[in-house]
Image (cartoon, coloured by chain):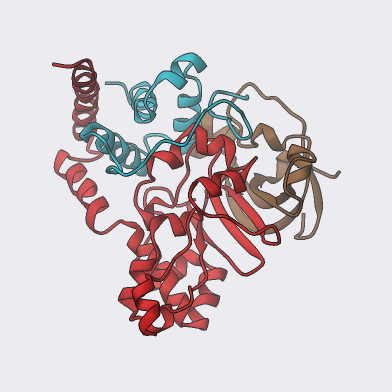
Amino acid sequence: MNVGDRVRVRTMNPPGHNRAPRYVRGHVGEVVRFVGDGRFPDESAVVGSAAHREDIVTVAFPSAELWGPDAHSGDRVHVDLFVSYLEQP
Amino acid sequence: MAYANDVGGMHGFGDLPEEHGPLFESVWEAQTFVLNQAFVAAGAYTLDEFRATMERIPPGEYYAMPYYERWLTALETLVGS
Amino acid sequence: MSADHHRNAELQARVNRLLDVAEARGVITRAGVDQRIEAFSDRVTARNGAEMIVRAWNSPEYRERLLADAGAAAAELGHVGGGFSSDIRLHAVANSAEVHNVIVCTLCSCYPVAWLGPPPAWYKSEAYRSRVVRDPRGVLAEFGLVVPDSTEVRVWDASAEARYIVVPERPEGAEALSEAEQVALVTRDCLIGTALPTVPARVREVT
C-alpha cells in the first residue's frame, strides 16, 4: 500500500473493538501518508500488549464521498487506518 | 461496533458547550485523567483495552454520564477498586 | 448539600479508592498524581505547541523538521511527548492560503496532551466530534472562523495513535514582534484549527 493508492475501507461490523469509524466504512479514499505501525487495536483490546503490530496509513476522503452532494466540494476528511481495514476499490 | 462512542457524522448532539472555565471542573476529573495515564504507563492495560471497556457501557448510560465518569467507570472495571 | 455537590462527592470517593489501588500497586503515589496535575497548569500546556509554531515561523529549517517529524522537533525545544504510551506520535499539518486544517477524534477524544495539555470540554463533546467531520465550515463559523470557499478544509480524525497539531500561518504584522510576543498569539485553539492567530490592532498600527 503506497501513497497515492486508492483504497476502500472494508464494509464490516465486528462485535468487538475496532478503530475504523463507521462513517468511512465502504468508502473510497486516497492514501496520503504512511504513519508507522501500531498494536492492532481489535486484538489489543482483548489480549493487551501481546497483540500483533500492523501498519497504519492516513487515508483522505473527499467530503462528498462521505456525506453526499451537500458537502463542500474540495474539502477532505483524513482518517488513520490500519491496513487490514482496507481493500482495493 | 458501532458503539456509542462512534459519533462521526451523527446528528442531534446540539450546540457546542461553552468553554471558558478550567480544563478540569473538579479534582476527581484531573485525578482520573492522571490515573489512567499512570496505569497505561505501568502496563496494567493498553489504551485499546481502556477504550474497549468504555465502549461497552450501554449507550443510554454512556451518553448520560459526564465525560470523565466514563473514564472512571472503565478504570474501575479494569483495575478493580 | 446540593445534588451536584453530593454527586461530586460520590465520584470523588470512587476516585479515592482508585488512588489507593494505584498506590498499593506501586503505580503512582498521591503526591505523584498531584505533581502531574500541577504540571498541566505550568509545564504541560498549549504554550509548548505555540513555541514550536513560532520557531517554525522564524526558521525555515525548523519548519521543515517540524513537518517531517513533529515529535523530534518538539523534543528539540525540550517538549518530550508520548510519555505514557510509546505508540503515540505527533504529526504537524500546515495551513496555507489554499488549505485550512482542523483536528478531531471522532471515536474517543485523542488529543496531543503531551504538547498541548489536556483538551477543552468542547473538544471532547459529542457535539464537536459528530459535526466537525460532516460540517467543518459550520463548526468553524461558530468559533468565528469563516473559511473562504476557495480554501480547502482538511479535517484530521485521529483514529490511530497519531496525534495532530495545526501549524497556522504567521499573521501579517507579527514579524515585528519578539518571539515571546508571537508565542502569545498562538492560542490553544489555533493549534486545534478552530482559530487563527491575530495581531492586535494597536500593534499593527505601529508597524
Q: Residue at x 73, y 35 (%)?
A: A25
Is residue B46 visible from the viewing direction of this image? Answer: no
Taking the image as shown, residue C185 lies to the left or right of residue C104, namely left
Q: Nearer the viewer, residue C150 or C182?
A: C150
Q: Residue at x 67, y 61 (%)?
A: C151
Taking the image as shown, residue C199 lies to the left or right of residue A16, namely left
Residue B21 appears at what percent x and percent y?
Answer: 28, 42
Please tell me in which quadrant of the rendered image residue A5 appears. bottom right
Determine whether B2 is above or below A29 in the image. above
Determine whether B29 is above or below C136 in the image. above
* Chain B palette colour: cyan
Please tell me in which quadrant of the rendered image residue A87 appears. top right
Farthest residue, direction right:
A89
Q: Nearer the viewer, residue A51 or A68?
A: A68
* Chain C palette colour: red
* Chain A palette colour: brown
Is residue C37 visible from the viewing direction of this image? Answer: yes
Residue A13 appears at what percent x and percent y?
Answer: 70, 25
Q: Residue at x 35, y 44 (%)?
A: B41
Q: Quadrant of the N terminus of chain C?
A: top left
Residue C31 appears at what percent x and percent y?
Answer: 14, 43
Q: Residue at x 23, y 48 (%)?
A: C36
User: What is the tally of numbered marks visible in this picture?
Assistant: 0
Residue C13 appears at what percent x and percent y?
Answer: 19, 22
Determine whether C139 is above or below A30 in the image. above
Q: Nearer the viewer, residue C17 or C114?
A: C114
Q: Quadrant of the C terminus of chain C?
A: bottom left
